[in-house]
Protein backbone atom coordinates (compact mmCIF):
# COMPACT_ATOMS: atom_id res chain seq x y z
CA UNK A 1 0.00 0.00 0.00
CA UNK A 2 1.29 3.43 -0.95
CA UNK A 3 0.28 6.82 0.36
CA UNK A 4 1.06 10.10 -1.33
CA UNK A 5 0.57 13.76 -0.48
CA UNK A 6 2.09 16.95 -1.81
CA UNK A 7 2.45 20.57 -0.86
CA UNK A 8 3.81 23.67 -2.51
CA UNK A 9 6.56 24.95 -0.23
CA UNK A 10 7.78 27.85 -2.37
CA UNK A 11 6.82 29.32 -5.76
CA UNK A 12 7.07 26.53 -8.37
CA UNK A 13 8.49 24.17 -5.70
CA UNK A 14 6.60 21.11 -4.52
CA UNK A 15 7.36 18.41 -1.97
CA UNK A 16 5.79 15.05 -2.74
CA UNK A 17 5.69 12.86 0.35
CA UNK A 18 5.48 9.13 -0.25
CA UNK A 19 4.88 6.40 2.31
CA UNK A 20 4.57 2.63 2.30
CA UNK A 21 5.60 0.41 -0.59
CA UNK A 22 6.36 1.60 -4.12
CA UNK A 23 5.82 -1.61 -6.02
CA UNK A 24 4.34 -3.04 -9.18
CA UNK A 25 0.67 -2.10 -9.51
CA UNK A 26 -1.56 0.78 -10.54
CA UNK A 27 -1.03 2.80 -7.33
CA UNK A 28 2.40 3.96 -8.43
CA UNK A 29 0.99 5.45 -11.63
CA UNK A 30 -0.30 8.27 -9.42
CA UNK A 31 3.27 9.54 -9.10
CA UNK A 32 3.71 10.13 -12.83
CA UNK A 33 0.17 11.52 -13.17
CA UNK A 34 0.78 13.96 -10.31
CA UNK A 35 4.10 15.10 -11.83
CA UNK A 36 2.36 15.68 -15.18
CA UNK A 37 -0.38 17.73 -13.50
CA UNK A 38 2.06 19.79 -11.45
CA UNK A 39 4.29 20.46 -14.46
CA UNK A 40 1.16 21.72 -16.23
CA UNK A 41 0.64 24.14 -13.32
CA UNK A 42 4.17 25.50 -13.76
CA UNK A 43 5.91 23.63 -10.94
CA UNK A 44 9.60 23.08 -11.75
CA UNK A 45 11.39 21.90 -8.58
CA UNK A 46 10.18 18.53 -7.31
CA UNK A 47 11.37 17.08 -4.02
CA UNK A 48 10.34 13.51 -3.36
CA UNK A 49 10.28 12.76 0.37
CA UNK A 50 11.07 9.05 0.65
CA UNK A 51 11.67 8.93 4.42
CA UNK A 52 8.50 6.88 5.02
CA UNK A 53 8.98 4.50 2.06
CA UNK A 54 9.66 1.01 3.35
CA UNK A 55 10.15 -0.87 0.08
CA UNK A 56 10.62 -0.19 -3.60
CA UNK A 57 10.95 -2.45 -6.64
CA UNK A 58 12.07 -1.88 -10.21
CA UNK A 59 8.60 -0.68 -11.20
CA UNK A 60 8.69 1.91 -8.41
CA UNK A 61 12.11 3.04 -9.56
CA UNK A 62 10.82 3.21 -13.13
CA UNK A 63 8.17 5.70 -12.01
CA UNK A 64 10.93 8.02 -10.81
CA UNK A 65 12.87 7.61 -14.06
CA UNK A 66 9.73 8.49 -16.01
CA UNK A 67 9.06 11.50 -13.75
CA UNK A 68 12.70 12.60 -14.00
CA UNK A 69 12.57 12.56 -17.81
CA UNK A 70 9.38 14.65 -17.85
CA UNK A 71 10.78 17.16 -15.35
CA UNK A 72 14.12 17.48 -17.15
CA UNK A 73 12.38 17.93 -20.51
CA UNK A 74 10.99 21.27 -19.29
CA UNK A 75 14.18 22.37 -17.57
CA UNK A 76 12.99 21.43 -14.11
CA UNK A 77 14.80 19.71 -11.27
CA UNK A 78 14.09 16.60 -9.22
CA UNK A 79 15.60 15.92 -5.80
CA UNK A 80 15.25 12.86 -3.58
CA UNK A 81 15.09 13.29 0.20
CA UNK A 82 15.26 10.89 3.12
CA UNK A 83 15.93 7.64 1.26
CA UNK A 84 17.70 5.17 3.54
CA UNK A 85 18.53 1.47 3.80
CA UNK A 86 17.02 -0.80 1.17
CA UNK A 87 15.31 2.06 -0.64
CA UNK A 88 18.55 4.01 -1.16
CA UNK A 89 20.41 0.79 -2.03
CA UNK A 90 17.86 0.08 -4.76
CA UNK A 91 18.74 3.39 -6.41
CA UNK A 92 22.46 2.85 -5.85
CA UNK A 93 22.51 -0.62 -7.39
CA UNK A 94 20.94 0.77 -10.55
CA UNK A 95 23.47 3.68 -10.48
CA UNK A 96 20.64 6.19 -10.20
CA UNK A 97 22.37 7.79 -7.22
CA UNK A 98 24.68 9.27 -9.87
CA UNK A 99 21.74 10.76 -11.82
CA UNK A 100 19.23 11.72 -9.14
CA UNK A 101 20.37 14.08 -6.38
CA UNK A 102 19.90 12.60 -2.90
CA UNK A 103 19.64 14.59 0.32
CA UNK A 104 19.34 13.40 3.93
CA UNK A 105 15.99 15.17 4.38
CA UNK A 106 13.58 17.66 2.82
CA UNK A 107 15.18 20.62 4.61
CA UNK A 108 18.55 19.81 3.04
CA UNK A 109 16.93 19.32 -0.37
CA UNK A 110 15.39 22.78 -0.21
Image: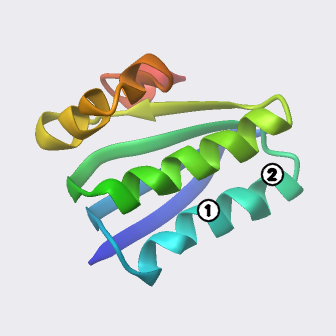
The answer to whether residue 44 is seen in the rendering is yes
Residue 58: which numbered mark, if any?
Answer: none
Left or right, 4 with respect to 92, comes to: right
Residue at the outermost left position: 85
N-terminal of the pair, mark 2 or mark 1, is: 1
Q: Which residue is mark 1?
A: 32
**Residue 2 drawn at (x, y percent):** 33, 72
Q: Which residue is drawn at the image coordinates 47% and 43% (left, top)?
A: 48
Q: Which residue is drawn at the image coordinates 59% and 53% (left, top)?
A: 7
Q: Which residue is mark 2?
A: 39
Q: Nearer the viewer, residue 42 or 86?
A: 86
Left or right, 97 with respect to 57, comes to: right
Q: Quadrant of residue 46?
A: top right
Q: Secondary structure at mark 2?
A: helix
Q: Nearer the viewer, residue 21 or 42?
A: 21
Q: Quadrant of residue 22?
A: bottom left
**Residue 83 drawn at (x, y percent):** 27, 36
Q: Which residue is drawn at the image coordinates 83% and 28% (left, top)?
A: 75
Amino acid sequence: MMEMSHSEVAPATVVIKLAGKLMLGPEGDQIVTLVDNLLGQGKRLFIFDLAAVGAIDSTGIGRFISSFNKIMAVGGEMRMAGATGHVFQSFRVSLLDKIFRFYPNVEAAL
